[in-house]
Image (cartoon, grey):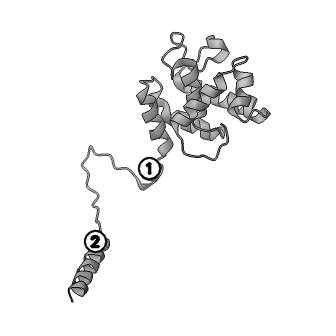
Amino acid sequence: MKNIITSITVFAVLISISAVSVCAENVSDSSATIKKAAELEAFDYRVENLRNFLEKYNSPLTSYADEFVQYADENDLDYRLVPAISGVESTFGKRIPVDSFNAYGWANGEYTFESWEDSISHVSLVLKNKYIDKGAVSINQIAKIYAPPSSTWGKNVSFFVRKIDILPLNFDII
């Protein structure tokens, strides 16, 4: 009899827990900003993941995580590739020529971009058009063009790609 009463009690508790409904009321005053459902659905873990990663390195690129993901998506790139290159070339933008926004060793560090966003956009576009689209579809293949004659550049970029996000993605860049 005790077992039946205990089972009924446990069952009742489980039903009551699963039946709890949450009612949300939209309360705001004139200074409040209400996020639309569409904005909440637009959350992209890659942005937060990259932002948190770059923050660990105290990178000036931390606040540009959105742009890295945006331009990677626009150019059908792995979102980790361009930030990983910046890790190898400039410790994520910390060691660059003054006011160059060149975290990628572009033109052997001689190139100056207008802004961080300009640099992310440009490097992403060129990687897509002049590397990936021309057959350099892995980091090791990109390395032969991007950083010859280095035998370690590709391994180092791959290291940072995996550090940024170890989850398998739809890209086979490594």
With respect to residue 19, does 76 lie above or below? Answer: above
**Which quadrant would residue 74 be assigned to in this image?**
top right
Residue 113 x %, y %: 58, 18
Residue 12's disc is none
| Residue at image coords 61%, 17% | 105
Mark 2 or mark 1: which comes first in sequence?
Answer: 2
User: As rendered, which of 73 and 165 lies closer to the eye?
Assistant: 165
State the image coordinates of residue 80 (x, y, percent, origin top left): 57, 35
Rendered residue at 26%/51% (across/down): 28
Left or right: 104 with respect to 27? right
Q: Dot 1, how many residues are within 10 Å of its Cα: few (below 14), some (14-19), or many (20+)?
A: few
Q: Position of residue 9 (x, y in %)?
A: 23, 80
Instruction: Name the residue rendered at 28%, 46% in the picture.
Output: 32
The kind of residue tagged 1 is Glu
Residue identifier under label 1: 39
Q: Would residue 66 appear left or right of 3 to someone viewing this image? A: right
For residue 156, above or below residue 149: below
Residue 121 shows in this picture: no
**Left or right, 91 with reference to 149:** left
Badge 2 density bin: few <14, some 14–19, many ≥20, Cα 10 Å: few
Front-lying residue, 60 or 160: 160
Q: Look at the numbered disc 1 and give the secondary structure of its residue.
A: helix
Look at discs 2 and 1 and give the one toward the viewer: 2
> Residue under circle 2?
17
Coordinates of residue 23 in the picture (x, y in percent):
28, 65
- State which quarter of the image contains the N terminus: bottom left
Q: Quadrant of residue 82?
A: top right
**Looking at numbered disc 2 in the image, what kind of residue is underneath it?**
Ile
